[in-house]
Amino acid sequence: MEAVIDHDNRRKFTRVPVQLRAELLVPERPVCHVRVENLSFSGAGVFCDMAVDSPPVYRGELTMVLVLHPDDRHFNINLKGRIAYAQNGGRMGLIFTGIDVNDFNHFKQLMLAHSDHSAALLEDIELSPGLALH
């Protein structure tokens, strides 16, 4: 299996299993619709049906848009990031690098609502979520 791997990607934060839809926005490329399988305050594990045969090779910044309510984009959460790894089969890991302050508050509530370990998540936030707020 061929994979693009960022060896600096180490899990430091609590992962929360989720079943969400998102869009990956990459400059000058078509939107990639993904299924989000897990989230943390530093990244996400996603699956892209469009990338099953060949993993995307892209090293620049992208935006992951969590689509929480398909009929009202007002509820979307936008996270800046980059691809940590991409494997044949469509599985990818993302590292988050930035988020808007309002989106962060919404993201924090989403994470706490989906977690059985809210104390660990709150500790993650205090230790530095790895997200630059802007």
Image (cartoon, rainbow, N blue to C red):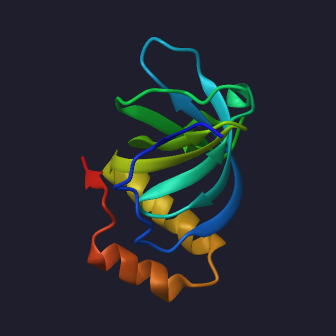
In terms of image quadrants, where is residue 22? top right
Percent coordinates x, y for residue 40 in the rendering: 50, 64
Give the residue drawn at x 60%, y 33%. Answer: 23
Looking at the picture, tell me which residue is in the foreground, 4 or 121: 4
Quarter-of-image position of residue 15: bottom right
Q: Is residue 90 left or right of residue 27?
A: right
Q: Nearer the viewer, residue 122 or 47?
A: 47
Query: Image point 42% across, 50% down: which residue?
Result: 95
In the rendered image, is residue 77 in sight? no
92 or 65: nearer the viewer: 92
**Across the whole image, how many numbered discs are drawn on residues?**
0
Of the 4 image quadrants, the one containing the N terminus is: top right
Residue 53 percent across, percent down from the top left: 72, 26
Task: Tell me which residue sits at (73%, 38%) in the image.
Answer: 89
Q: Is residue 18 visible?
A: yes
- The answer to whether residue 122 is above or below residue 70 is below
Residue furthest out toward the bottom: 119
Q: Residue furthest top?
A: 28
Along the line of sight, the residue nearer the viewer: 101 or 94? 94
| Horizontal side of residue 69 vs 77, given as left or right | right
Quarter residue 18 falls in: bottom right
Residue 107, x across and y down, in percent:
49, 58
Q: Position of residue 45 (x, y in %)?
A: 59, 53
Examine the rendered structure and indicate whether residue 68 appears above or below residue 31. below
**Taking 32 as reference, is 41 above or below it?**
below
Question: Which residue corresponds to the image point at 52% horizontal and 67% vertical from the top-left?
Answer: 109
